[in-house]
Image: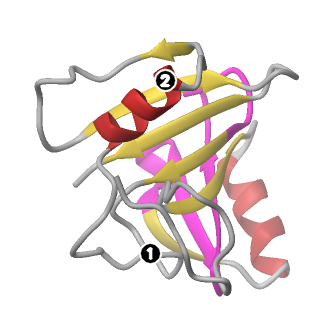
Amino acid sequence: MEFRDDPESPGTLDLGAFSISLTVADLEVSRDFYAALGFVVTGGGLDDNYLILRNGHAVIGLFSGMFDRNILTFNPGLSPSVGQLESFTDVREIQAHLREQGIELTETADPDSTGPAHITLVDPDGNPILIDQFL
């Protein structure tokens, strides 16, 4: 498991790139709103019911009809600039660490699997968190 010791990058557990996944009523209206804030579409599509937008290191996912609530999202294997990392903490290692800390997971990954997988949990205030490794 990779723990950070870089004072320029605080935190102890490397969860990967951070974004927020927003549930929206109208993708085009939301896309246009965030475009006015300087965001550009870098992934997804209107026909896919989701768009990924970036503005510098800030990443927002807009999702229509896919989630009930907004979700905090982490992507192991991706840098803050959304580049693929050569070395990263696998989601199954993160899962084991969270369980050791007594954190309840709402969805788990098969600990014997490799490659893409995800886990979900909910913070004490009911905010859903997705740790989604797609590499």
The image quadrant that residue 132 belongs to is top left
Left or right placement of residue 41 versus residue 113 in this view: right
Query: Dot 1: what SS?
Result: loop
Identified by mark 2, the residue type is: Glu
Residue at the spot 63% in from the left edge and 80% down from the top edge: 57
Mark 1 closeness class: few <14, some 14–19, many ≥20 residues within 10 Å: some
Closer-to-camera residue (89/27): 89
Q: Where does residue 104 sit, x and y in percent of width and height?
A: 58, 13
Residue at the spot 62% in from the left edge and 58% down from the top edge: 19
The image quadrant that residue 123 belongs to is top right
- Residue pointed to by mark 2: 100
Part of the protein shown in magenta: 44-71
- Residue pointed to by mark 1: 79
Residue at the spot 49% in from the left edge and 59% down from the top edge: 14
Q: Where does residue 56 sit, x and y in percent of width and height?
A: 65, 87
Q: Where does residue 129 sit, x and y in percent of width and height?
A: 63, 33
